[in-house]
Image: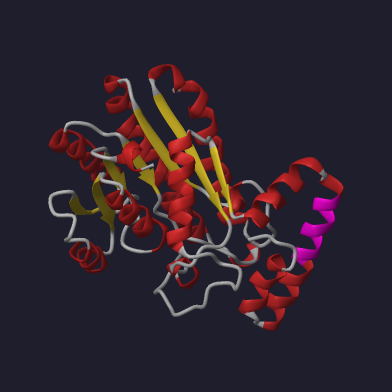
């Protein structure tokens, strides 16, 4: 993998924490030139400073991916400044596990703006550049919730199914232009997403017990990218759940009905932890 990424120009959104930060760090370890972007200026500065040993290959830009102009300028500047745009990791996003009756239109607009429009803006900026080059790789972060319709995650599933559909469609459309497209569909990964509401201030929250480290997620993602995989789903149990959903609809139906029952009870009892334990028991996310 090191030779695959060495010297390549990569833009990573949501790079100030979690999967985005781990991807940026792994890319740098493999010799890439990385533009880290995030809307959290303080955290982004701290991450970039901590990567100072990669002198000359670390660049940071404060970007709100819900702002099309900011995304466009950042992607174009990266290509102009460094001579190419080899990889775009559209990673920024927010989670949402809540009853549909509690969701306001403000919740819907925020999660669609961030999780879906943020990816669309990145794709819109990158495709013309990569088409001119005749090469490039767009990597969009979705979720297992973009492959399996988890109850009480309708907002999240809406956006992540959209990211999967966009990515898979473009994978075939853009292949003739030399552009690869991958979509990342992880289960639970240790990150700040579990303490970041769609609307409101972040809070301290423990990730589910089956969460894997962000560094492990980054390793699996970059291995999939280097292999040219279209859908990069991991770890094993969530990946098996996706396969079950596709291959055994009756069994998947029973499982998801049970998840719905457990989550309904958890929300009624105010037990946030039980919401995620419902899927862990069957190897989901």
Against 80, residue 109 (above or below) is: below
Determine the residue located farthest toward the top in the rendered image: 176
Position above or below: 264 against 284: below
Residue 53 lies in the magenta stretch: no
Of 99 and 253, which appears nearest the observer?
Answer: 253
Q: Nearer the viewer, residue 272 or 112?
A: 272
Q: Is residue 254 covered in magenta? A: yes
Q: Tell me where residue 235 appears, x and y as whole percent.
A: 59, 55
**Quarter of the image where one finds residue 225:** top left
Name the spot of residue 172 as percent of width and height, x first.
52, 23
Colour approach in the figure: secondary structure
Residue at 31%, 56% in the rendered image = 25
Report x, y in % for residue 247: 79, 41
Q: Which residues are magenta?
A: 251-260
Residue 116 visible in this rendered orientation of the protein: no
In the rendered image, which quarter contains the N terminus?
top left
Which secondary structure is most common in the magenta stretch? helix
Between 153 and 228, the one nearer to me in the picture: 228
Q: Is residue 232 visible?
A: yes
Give me the residue at 62% from left, 59% from top.
153
The residue that appears at 49% across and 78% down in the rendered structure is: 205
The quadrant of the picture occupied by the C terminus is bottom right
Query: In the rendered view, does 174 fall on the left or right side of 38?
Result: right
Q: Which residue appears at 51% of the width and 61% of the height?
A: 95
* Total residue callouts: 0
**In the rendered image, the vertical position of residue 153 relative to residue 10, given as above or below:** below
Q: Is residue 258 left or right of residue 103?
A: right
């Amino acid at each position: 993998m090191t030779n695959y990424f060495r010297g390549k120009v990569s833009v990573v959104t949501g790079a100030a924490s979690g999967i985005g930060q781990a991807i940026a760090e792994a890319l740098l370890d493999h010799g890439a030139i990385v533009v880290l972007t995030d809307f959290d200026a303080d955290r982004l500065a701290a991450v970039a400073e901590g990567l100072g040993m990669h002198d000359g290959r670390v660049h940071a830009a404060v970007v709100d991916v819900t702002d099309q102009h900011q995304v466009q300028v950042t992607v174009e500047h990266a290509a102009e400044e460094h001579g190419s745009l080899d990889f775009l990791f559209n990673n920024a996003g927010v989670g949402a596990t809540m009853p549909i009756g509690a969701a306001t239109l403000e919740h819907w607009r925020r999660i669609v703006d961030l999780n879906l429009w943020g990816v669309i803006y990145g794709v819109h900026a990158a495709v013309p550049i990569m088409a001119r080059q005749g090469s490039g790789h767009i990597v969009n972060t979705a979720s297992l919730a973009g492959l399996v319709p988890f109850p009480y995650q309708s907002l999240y599933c809406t956006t992540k199914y959209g990211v999967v559909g966009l990515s898979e469609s473009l994978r075939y459309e853009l292949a003739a232009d030399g552009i690869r497209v991958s979509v990342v569909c992880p289960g639970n990964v240790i990150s700040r997403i579990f303490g970041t509401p769609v609307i409101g201030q972040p809070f301290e929250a423990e990730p589910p017990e089956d969460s894997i480290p962000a560094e492990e997620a980054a390793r699996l993602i970059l291995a999939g990218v280097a292999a040219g995989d279209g859908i990069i789903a991991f770890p094993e149990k969530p990946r098996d759940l996706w396969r079950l959903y596709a291959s055994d609809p009756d069994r998947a139906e029973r499982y998801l009905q049970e998840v719905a029952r457990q989550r309904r009870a958890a929300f009624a009892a105010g037990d946030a932890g039980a919401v995620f334990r419902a899927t862990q028991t069957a190897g989901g996310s």
